[in-house]
Amino acid sequence: MSGVTMEAGSILPILKKKLAFLSGGKDRRSGLILTIPLNSDQTSMEELGATLDYLLSIPSDKCKARGFTVIVDGRRSQWNIVKTVVLMLQNVIPAEVSLVCVVKPDEFWDKKVTHFCFWKEKDRLGFEVILVSANKLTRYIEPCQLTDDFGGSLDYDHSDWLNKRLVFEKFTKESTSLLDELTIINDSEKSASVDKDKSTDGALLPSFDPETVLQTGHELLSELQQRRFNGTEGGGGGQAAPAWCPMEEELLAQPQVTKLLDSLREQYTKYQELCRQRNKRAQLDEIHAKVMQVVNWLQGPGSELLKTQQTIGDSMRAAQALQQKHEEIESQHSEWFAVYVELNQQIAALLSAGEEEEVAELKALQQQLSDVCYSQASQLETRQNVLQAAHAFHSTTQELSQQLDGLLGMLCADVSPSDGASIQQNLKLLEEKLQTVEAGLSSLRQKGTLVLEQMCGQASWSLEEAESPPGEQQDNVQHVQAVMEEMELRKQRCEDMVDVRRLKMLQMVQLFKCEEDALQAVEWLGELLDALLKTHVRLGDDSQETRTMLDKHKKFVDVAQSTYDYGRQLLQATVVLCQSLRCTTRSSGDTLPRLNRVWKQFTVSADERQQRLEMALSFHTAAERALQQERVEVESLDEVDSSGKTLLDRLTLPIIFPDGSEQFFGSPSDTAATAEGVRERLLLIEERRLQMQEARLLNNKDEDEEDAVNGLEGRLDVIGEELSEKEEQGEEEKEAEHQDEDSERATQDR
């Protein structure tokens, strides 16, 4: 029966009935005490046998060799049951039983027991059986080794024992199984590490949690170490017995727990190191797998996405669509770049605490991952730069095309300005538009060059992955060059048209300028005429002044002649420009007739002024000569007098223009002042004449002198009256002429 291994859990309901138990007490031979408490109920021999088999499997062989003392408590049972139990002990534990103490009732069994003497059956039973009352049981067993049921002081809690037994068996089973598993795992991993080419399909895991099993074992060991008792041997002369632990070796096997814990800790430490190495290897494998996943995607689908995006579009809208598509591709790459950043951080953390072999592997993975990611990021950036440059190029192209269309529309429109200022404004606007087009074309050249350079950079990494450059690149280059050439041609055509339009507009400006200057010449000539008539009235007080005024008059006439000639030239240039511009609707109009009319009026007035100045010069010269000479002929004085009167008569006459109109020089007061100067000279001549006559009269008789003097004074009075009458008559005629002229001007104005 000792070879049979039983567990408390398999017969737990039976053990809970407490049909038999090992209290932990010992007899004087240090043998264990087995107690079988019988009761009035019918006891199942099978259950009792199973209980005894389990209890006897607990002690060690050394403990069993010292024998058992069995206490059969029959105080609450019948004799035949007691007898049956005693006989059953012969079959269950004949060799281990050294003494059977049957505790009898105090009354009832004395007569019956005499009929069955167990001591006579000692040889047949193999052990000694005694009948004893409970109070005399201490003769054989120390009281401290007996429970309180038999008057002893030994504490025993069957439920507590059973619970701890269950815990012990569970720990023993789990720890033994876990120890075997950990040993197998450690040994298999050790052999796998020796044979590196051989890899296990999966990581072996223990059936139980080592931490939980170790914690259970430590708690159990702590409970075992706390269960210590002190007592005295009942037959040892009252001497104190040494301290002993009933649960130490025989019952719960404290050394076995300690040994299991030590072995388990050792294997678990190895297993932890194994798990650490395994986790590190798994982490490395996981990182390697993720790295290869990132690398494979970037070099596979990621590169394919970029290969399919090579065009730059043929318009700004197409370039925007390509940019949106590229942003989607960048978004897909961003997810993998995020994985790259995370992996790089993990690798950096492992590098700081990794071994030499692991560091080399991690650095190789990190370098591979970085190279691929940076290469792909560089391609994405290059593609983005190409698309941005292409968008700017198409935007500039569209803007330049609109500018050229606007310039062409302006060139195709008819030019019909109303004056030179509007032509100048249109010409300035045309020049500004041309400058804008030139600036736009220059910007287009720069952005086209940038696009070509960016595409060359894109083509460089495309060539690294393909044997020949893709056809899209050649198409892109040809498209950019074609657009730039087309814009150059359009700009050149517009420039040619601008040159023609500029020449035409400059001619129109010149035409308007000639017309304006011709009108200005007419105005200037009219102003000269007006000045001649209104201010050129005086004839001078002497010959010197008159001669000076005559010279100024000639210069004045030369200025008027130059103004007239200038106006004629401008009008001739106007005719030529109209013919060049094919402007049949424009002509000199009434400018030429006005110019001719004013000029004719001026020439008539200038000639009259010339004649009057010449007459005045002749008059003053003769008068001065007559006044300065000591002896003057009477005929000379008569000539002076005659020329003075003729001049006075000329001053009273108006200027008659070719159209029949009349005009006087200056105002009547100006004419009167001029005539007064002439009269003063005439008076001087008359005085000279009187002086001459007086001189002659000195030689005549006295009477003749007085008569002559009186006659001369009377003559002078007559001459003065005649001059006054003529002057009044001239003033009246001039006033009449002024009134007629004002009426004629009013009529012309209407």
Image (spheres, helix red, strand yellow):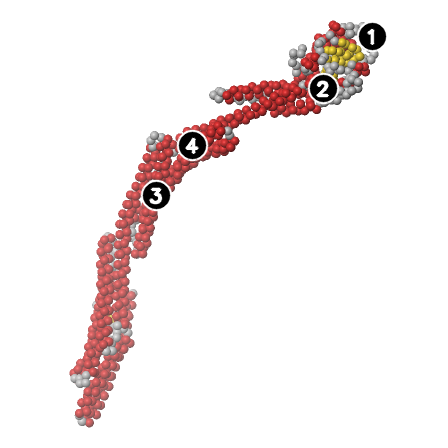
Q: Residue at horizontal 68%, vertical 15%?
A: 60
Q: Is residue 196 above or below residue 713?
A: above
Q: Residue at horizontal 57%, vertical 20%?
A: 183
Q: Nearer the observer, disc 1 or disc 3?
A: 1
Viewer-nearest residue: 431 or 188: 188
Gap in angstroms between the C-alphas marked 4 and 2: 73 Å
Q: Which residue is mark 1?
A: 111
| Label placed on residue 446 | 3
Q: Which residue is mark 2?
A: 246
Q: Seen in the image, is 257 located left or right of residue 280?
A: right
| Numbered disc 4: secondary structure | helix
Residue 653: percent from the left, percent from the top?
Answer: 23, 74
Q: Which residue is mark 4?
A: 372
| Numbered disc 3: secondary structure | helix
Q: Residues within 10 Å of mark 2 (few under 14, many from 20)?
A: many
Mark 4 belongs to which amino acid?
A: Val
CB under 8 Å between discs 4 and 2: no
Q: Earlier in the sequence, mark 2 or mark 1?
A: 1
Q: Residue at horizontal 25%, vertical 56%?
A: 586
CB under 8 Å between discs 3 and 2: no
Instruction: Answer with the quarter of the image where residue 104 lies.
Output: top right
Q: Nearer the observer, disc 3 or disc 2?
A: 2
Q: Earlier in the sequence, mark 4 or mark 2?
A: 2
Residue 570: percent from the left, percent from the top?
Answer: 24, 60
Residue 227: percent from the left, percent from the top?
Answer: 71, 23
Q: Seen in the image, is 379 located left or right of residue 153?
A: left
Mark 1 belongs to which amino acid?
A: Lys
Q: Earlier in the sequence, mark 3 or mark 2?
A: 2
Mark 3 belongs to which amino acid?
A: Gln
Q: Earlier in the sequence, mark 1 or mark 3?
A: 1
Gap in angstroms between the C-alphas marked 2 and 1: 38 Å
